[in-house]
Structures are given as structure tokens and as C-alpha cells.
Amino acid sequence: MHTDTERCVRAVQSKDARFDGWFFTAVLTTRIYCRPSCPVVPPKVENMTFYPSAAACQQAGFRACKRCRPDTTPGSPEWNARADTVARAMRLIRDGVVDREGVPGLAARLGYSARQIERQLLAELGAGPLALARAQRAQTARLLIETTPLPMAEVAFAAGFSSIRTFNDTVREVFALAPTELRARAARGIARQTPGAITLRLPFRAPLTPDNLFGHLAATGVPGVEEWRDGSFRRTLSLPYGHGIAELTPQPEHIGCVLHLTDLRDLTIAISRCRWMLDLDADPVAVDDRLRTDPLLAPLVDKAPGRRVPRTVDAAEFAVRAVLGQQVSTAAARTHAARLVVAHGQAVDDPAGGLTHLFPTPARLAEIDPETLALPRSRRTTLTTLVAALADGTLKLGIDSDWDLARAQLMELPGFGPWTVEAIAMRALGDPDAFLPTDLGMRRAAQNLGLPSTPAALTARAAAWRPWRSYAVQYLWATEAHAINHLPA
């Protein structure tokens, strides 16, 4: 979008928050870059230039606005709506892969050379993988500086910087303030922190209807791994350097987030996975505008706009849970998953006392004797085949997955049909166009609305909803009086 100057200027002059994260405005006279909704008086048109990423602005010598804090905007919705190389690379960078594995590791995951990845990212985003990762490290550093009392040396290494000098130079360059000055400006916020926790706000693009989002996560939560408590969804996280517990609370203008981490180096990836789980980088206006073109869906959208797709923090975990949930009730699926967790999950300590385990890894599940599983024999075969493929790397599921390839690989496994594959594509891989026409709840909702109820006819009708059919599924499911559609009391 940053190449459409006229459209960008209109967004800046109207302070349209819907475009935050889509592009960034750099002011040539002040050398500052802002989000489109910055509350200051818009600069003259001839002094504006536009960039597709904060990293590109920083690389061009601009510093972040202290008023609108453009480095804290929701991510571009493009990276969650596409499955090409650039989008997959951006999801991996956001997940901290460059910091942990370097550019060669990023390239290897995508099946390209480092030079090809560099060239593609520069062409589309105006910055290479190192610059994009550096911008993310700067944002993580700012969070730690402003929300914790940690010594600056610990902040530097927790944010991923290789030296304190690099940390100091980057913070000064990006924010035009020394780290100690940033902390002094946010001193009141630090005083309100819970000991051992990092408290922050996760921004999103309005509108957001939290009912089905948090309702689904709470109603299907695995005991010991997930819970709903005092208005918040809580769950354990398995992270590269340790583990953590996330507490997420829906608020009118943001999602409240409290993280307990065993290693602060996991902060960036923990935030990324929470945002991914809640689908916070979606563009609800674009989604809802498309779905409103169907006269039978329009009333549902108008009644509760901004529905999100409830996702998962771990694609392999969800695939296992999807198999456990085949042809059984939600309660039965939770029971099966809870048994696996207690028997094979890693025990963790929860400061609040409600969560007990991490969900078991595919490698751990691959060691289980199938005869000990309280499942029908055919389901055992499906589960053991799946975890074996995940454990040995034959099947790779994650935020960087090629959606079509993953579907084809899943369909080759015994016991996998269209419903299970599409559920995994929608909730684990993040495909916004996944569709479940054979789902019983979908068919009932379609029939009640006057939509075609047979899978073939419903799929044909849903062609007009593309590329947002996953969101249409949420609106249709929400017509039923099921626990997944309501915030728990």
C-alpha cells in the first residue's frame, strides 16, 4: 500500500487507525516516522514519504515518534493472509527465528538461499531480515525497559542484542532517547508491575468481538494447560529457552497481557504467539466488508463485527487435539487431551496455582505404547501415525507452513479427512480461507439462515466470501447457543 501515495495521504490526514501497521509515514523535515493515526498535526504532503515497515524507516535514518509510538502498532495483516515466501519469512522473523538461527536458518526453513530471501524482503519491505529482526529487538528492549525494573545489561541480552554497546546505540538511534531516559519516562508503569511478571498491552485493529474468540479457547481448553479464571484466559507456553504462562484479558481498546517467563529471551516469541493465537493482526474492516456482500451474512456481521479466528500457540499440539476431537463431543476431547497431559506432559509451576503442565511434545507422544491409549483402534492408528510424522520431521506444521502442501501431506495420513485437515489449516496454520462445509454446526447454521446446507452447494455459495471463509465460519458458528460462542461467566 505504501506505493499508493494518494491513498496514504488521505489516511494520514484523516488519522485513520485502520491503516496502522499497513504503512508508516516518514517526515523529511523532522526525520521522524509515525503511524497513520498519529494525533499530531499532519505534515505537509510534500514532506511525507511512505515505507512498508518500521525497519525500512529506521534503515533510512528516521526515528520513532514519541507521541504515537509507531513501533507498537499491530502487525501488517498481509503476513497472516498470504502464504508466499515473503509472508512466511515475516511470520518467522516475528517468531524470533533470525535471532536464534540467523539468516541462514531462516533461509533453510523456507527452502531458499540467504541471498534470495534478502532480495525478496528488500524488494517488498525495503529492509532485509537483519534489519527487520533489529527493529523487533528494539521493540522488545523498549517493552523490557518500560515494564520491568531489570538492569539494563539484562534487558540488552534478553532482547537479543549481542552487546550492551549495540543495545545502547540501537535504542538511541530508534527512539532518540537513551535507555535510562526511556525508563524514566515510564517510571510509574514499572511501579505497578506484579513481581516476576511482565505486564503489557497487545494492540489490535478495531472492531473486535471477543465472545467467540475467548469463548472458544475457554470452552475447549485442556485442563492443566489452559483455564479461564477471573475474566482472563490463561495457558502454558513451551518456548525455545524455557516455558511460560500467559494471562490474556479482553479490554475495550486492547488485550491485557501478563507473562511469566523462565527466560526473558523468550519475550518476543511469547508475545508473537499470543498475538497469533488471538488473531490480533487481522484487518476486520476488510474481512467484514467482503462478508457483508452476502445479504444473508450481513446481519450477522452487523450484529457483532470484528470476529476473529481462535488459533493456537503450537500447530503440532492442535493437530494432536484435532485427532482426539474426531467424532466426539468437546467435553470428551478435553478429557482425552487431559489424560495425555497428565501422563506425558512436562510439569510446571504456576504462581496462581491453576496450571500444571505443558502439552506433551510429538517426540514424547511418539514413545507411547498405543495400547495404553483409551481410544478406538482406528483413532490410535491416526494419532500414532501423526505424532511419528511430526517427531521425525516428515510432517512440519507451523506458522511458516505452505498451506496447500500441508493440506496434501495431512490428507495422506490415515484417518485424516477434509474436516480435520481444514480445522488444522484454519486454527493451527492460520489460513484465513479454510472452510468446513461438512461441519455439523456449519450445516445447521446455514440451514437456519436460508443458505445451502449440503457441502457442495454451501462451498459454491461460499466462493463469494473468499479469501475470508475462515471468518465466515466464525459468524455461522456464532448463531448457535454453544459455550464456544460466549465469554464464560
Image (spheres, rainbow, N blue to C red):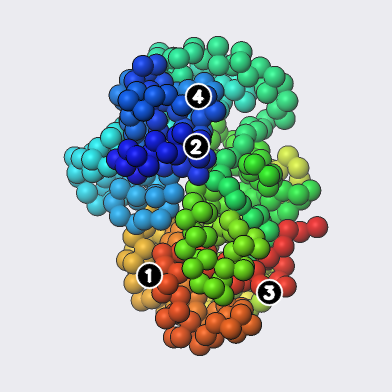
Q: Earlier in the sequence, mark 3 or mark 2?
A: 2
Q: What type is the residue that disc 1 sits on?
A: Arg
Q: Which mark is residue 14?
A: 2
Q: Earlier in the sequence, mark 4 or mark 1?
A: 4
Q: What type is the residue that disc 2 sits on?
A: Ser
Q: Quadrant of residue 202?
A: top right
Report whether 436 appears left or right of 49.
right
Q: What type is the residue that disc 4 sits on?
A: Val
Could you give the CA–CA distance between mark 4 and mark 1, rounded to whole angstroms? 49 Å
Label 1 CA crowd tier, 10 Å (few <14, some 14–19, many 20+): some
Q: Are marks 3 and 1 in contact (CB under 8 Å)?
A: no
Could you give the CA–CA distance between mark 2 and mark 1, rounded to whole angstroms? 42 Å
Identify the residue position indicated by label 4 in the image.
41
Q: Are marks 4 and 2 in contact (CB under 8 Å)?
A: no
Could you give the CA–CA distance between mark 4 and mark 2, rounded to whole angstroms? 11 Å
Q: Secondary structure at mark 1?
A: helix
Disc 3 or disc 2, which is closer to the eye? 2
